Image (tube, grey):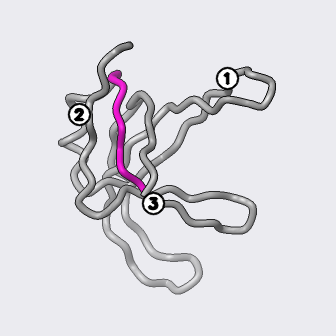
Amino acid sequence: MIKLEGTIISVFTQQGGASKKTGEAFADRDKIQLMGELELPNGSIKHELIDLTVENGKEYETLKGKRVSIPCGALASGRNVIFYVAKGGTPKLLTAV
């Protein structure tokens, strides 16, 4: 398991629809946008926006604009890494250092 840390920028619901490949219908999904920081080999910081599907977006509304840690998993899709919130994973508010 990986813990992604970052600031919750947005909480929204993505409208359902039908898969372009299979035609199978899918329901609306709650999502969050997490702004994380990735340290580069030269010491610079790159900000990266990650979209995550969550079970209940309302749980994250009060955390907007706050720094959190979220337990996640990851899988490779071609040259990209896809992150997902671990089943039953809940966000943990991080204190400022």
- Assign a secondary structure to mark 3: strand
Judge by depth and name the residue closer to the eye, 77 or 23. 77
Distance, label 3 to label 1, CA atoms, is: 23 Å
Residue 26 at x, y percent in the picture? 37, 73
Image disc number at residue 61: 2
Left or right of 61 on screen, residue 81: right
Residue 40 at x, y percent in the picture? 73, 30
Residue at 53% across, 86% down? 22
Q: Please identify the quarter of the rendering in which residue 1 is found.
A: bottom left
Q: Give the range drawn in magenta.
A: 65-72
Residue 76 at x, y percent in the picture? 63, 66
Residue at 60% across, 34% down? 48
Q: Do the residues labelled 2 and 3 touch (CB within 8 Å)?
A: no
Q: Is residue 13 one of those drawn in magenta?
A: no
Image disc number at residue 96: none
- Assign a secondary structure to mark 1: strand
Disc 1 crowd, CA 10 A, few/some/many (<14, 14-19, 20+):
few
Q: In which quarter of the image is the C terminus?
A: top left
Q: Is the magenta stretch mostly helix, strand or loop?
A: strand
Distance, label 2 to label 3, CA atoms, is: 22 Å
Residue type at tag 3: Gly
Looking at the image, is mark 2 or mark 3 earlier in the sequence? 2
- The residue at which mark 3 appears reads as 73
Looking at the image, is mark 1 or mark 2 earlier in the sequence? 1
